[in-house]
Amino acid sequence: MAFAKSKITFFFVLFFGFFLLYLHNLSQSVYGGDVGDLITASAVHGVAHAPGYPLFVFLGFLLVRGVPFFTPAGRVGLISVFSGALGIGIFYLLIERLTKRKFISFISSLILGFSFFYWFYSEIGEVFALHGLFIIALFYLAFLYRDTKQKLYGFLLFFVFGLSCTNHQTIIFLLPSLGVIVFPALKQLLKKQKKLFLLFGLAFFVGFLPYLYVPFASATHPIINWDNVHDVATFFRLLFRQDYGSLSAGAFDAPSFLQRLVCLKVYLLYLVTQLTIPVTLVALLGYWYLLKKNIWIFTAFSLSFLLSGPLFLFYAGFPVTSSFVLGVYERFFIMPSILFFIPFGLGLVFLSEKLASVFPKRNYALLFQIVFLIIPFALFFYNYPKTNMANVFAGDTIAKDMLSPLPPHAVLVLSGDTIVFNTWYVHYVLHERPDILLYNIGGGLVQDRITAAEKKYNQNDPNAALTDVFIDMSRTHPVFSTVLFQPKKGEKITWVPYGLAYQLYQDKGSIPSDTAYTKMTQKVWSQLHVPTANDLDNKAVHDLTISEFPDDYANSLVATGSFFFSQYKESSRALDYYKRALTVAPNNAKTYETLGIFYLAQKNNCQLVIANLSTAIYLNQFEKLPYFLLYNAYKTCEKDPHSAEALKLQFNQVFQSDFMKELKKNVSSSQ
């Protein structure tokens, strides 16, 4: 009885301790990535992007309406706070069941709770903290059912698995491992009570019922309504992620084998650094200990880690070309990190037993365990400033900067997850600039006024493209966009940089004069909250998904400078904007690439051309254009064929393709 009470005490201490910590650091902002879509869909009773995430969105819907404090983003983030804290409590119970050591289980729980990815995603409105809770709970229930063979745990296991499938589909990677763990109990059950399998299946089905939220929500025609689910075909389109490719990790070009290896290398490096080297080594010892003691449990943990970690991440092949993409990639580190870490407690048991056998009269084993307490404390002090999101509003700010300078009743066409979803949140949830019409190139947004204009336009011209609709709308509304499109036929339109977006001009005669454009850009940029050195001192703003916000401002400054240079031949003013871009984002590859082109046009600055283009390649080796420009500079400006040939070899190695063929293709496509 006393032992059971001590387990419950540890559970509640860990749960409430981490709940208060995560709550203190909770993000009150939209952050970046998919967060804006999930929060906005929750707030407007909508449907999030495929596969819909119905459990998370429905819980968010209840919290946005039921919690009287925090921002809407903070209310939805409470799902992550609760899930992260509860996950640590259950993790303690899981490790204690495996090791039978309370103190070791406590240390293990602290390490997981303070590890960066687990901690960080327990503080923002994303699905991954809830995903982590399901991972831990499923393994705990599997071992409870395996050890006790009580039907209740079997029902709970199948129910929770069904429920977890409505949150994040990568949970299916656990299926083989869970099967290995519960197989002995299920084998006995199959002989005695075959009908019970039907009840287990029913428990899974009940857990899967949150997907009913999708058609019910879609039927109310919310502003955020991905795939417009109204029949079986559209429901399965959302469920199986057909917009992205059902067996694809995302809508991006398939990477080369070398790029996949780079992805895998990045993952393994992150795994070791976030857990620390000692923890990684002890976890590996835990696997070895399991291999000797119980081959089936070793197989279960190994399978779950390999499937969700190295194999999935190698297959997915996220193109690690920017901080944002790496931020998308890092979310998928949480699941394999938890699974890899579970045997850590067994590794500590193994080392403790060895110390006890070598020094039977001295309690060095306990001392050794106490020393390991240094690691969670070190993780706490190292990760706290990086995870304290309570006062980070960069996600809200960039969305407001996208909207605030626009003239009344403008149309804004958006593309790119973070800027789209953050703008949705600020516009539809915080009600900033309700006069503006938004449109997302990637879908998901039901903008009736634009849809009606499209239908009306297509009645007159069935072959009209959506771009023609916006060109037509520009006669009555100022039209802005973050993506530069052109009509399929007719004369090209001109896009003029305007803050973080571009304004559409149908004919060149209406483009502002040099003086007017100078005055306009000065006014627009004076309204924007351009990041400063003081802003960048906050370690939390360097988290990957929002770390590119300075690059967004820098790219817009570069575009403005380039327009001054190309339209008005203002080289000095262009250079001023390029230099300002470097102060905002010193490591922005696009700025260095543009500076290389700028100096190339001067025809007497070979060293500056080469220096800037080389830096651009160093900062982003997966962008092809700087290679072509630098090759040209080596050949025609610097007269350095040796460096040109070395650059070709570097290109061939990075892209696994022939440089000269790619160069000819680039030249022909630009003509």
Image (spheres, rainbow, N blue to C red):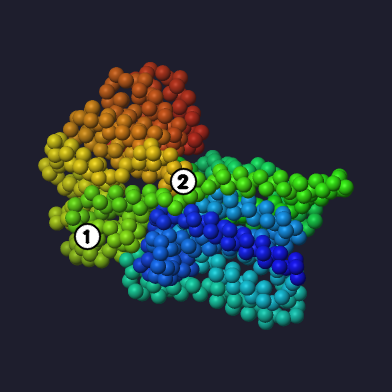
Q: Is residue 236 visible?
A: no
Q: Nearer the viewer, residue 599 or 234?
A: 599
x and y percentages locating residue 79 in the rendered image: 49, 63
| View extreme (top): residue | 639
In this rendered view, identify the residue nearer to me: 638 or 425: 425
- The one nearer the camera, 182 or 58, is 58
> CA gap, disc 1 to disc 2?
33 Å
- Indicate left or right for 98 with 656 as reference: right
As shown in the figure, which amino acid type bears the numbered disc 2?
Answer: Ala
**Residue located at (64% from left, 75% from top):** 155
Q: Which residue is mark 2?
A: 540
Give how far across and how far down residue 241 sits, in percent. 46, 62
- Label 1 sits on a secondary structure element that is loop
Closer to the chain start, of discs 1 and 2, is 1
- Dot 2: within a 10 Å radius of its alpha carbon, few (fewer than 14), some, or many (20 or more) residues? many
Q: Which residue is mark 1?
A: 435
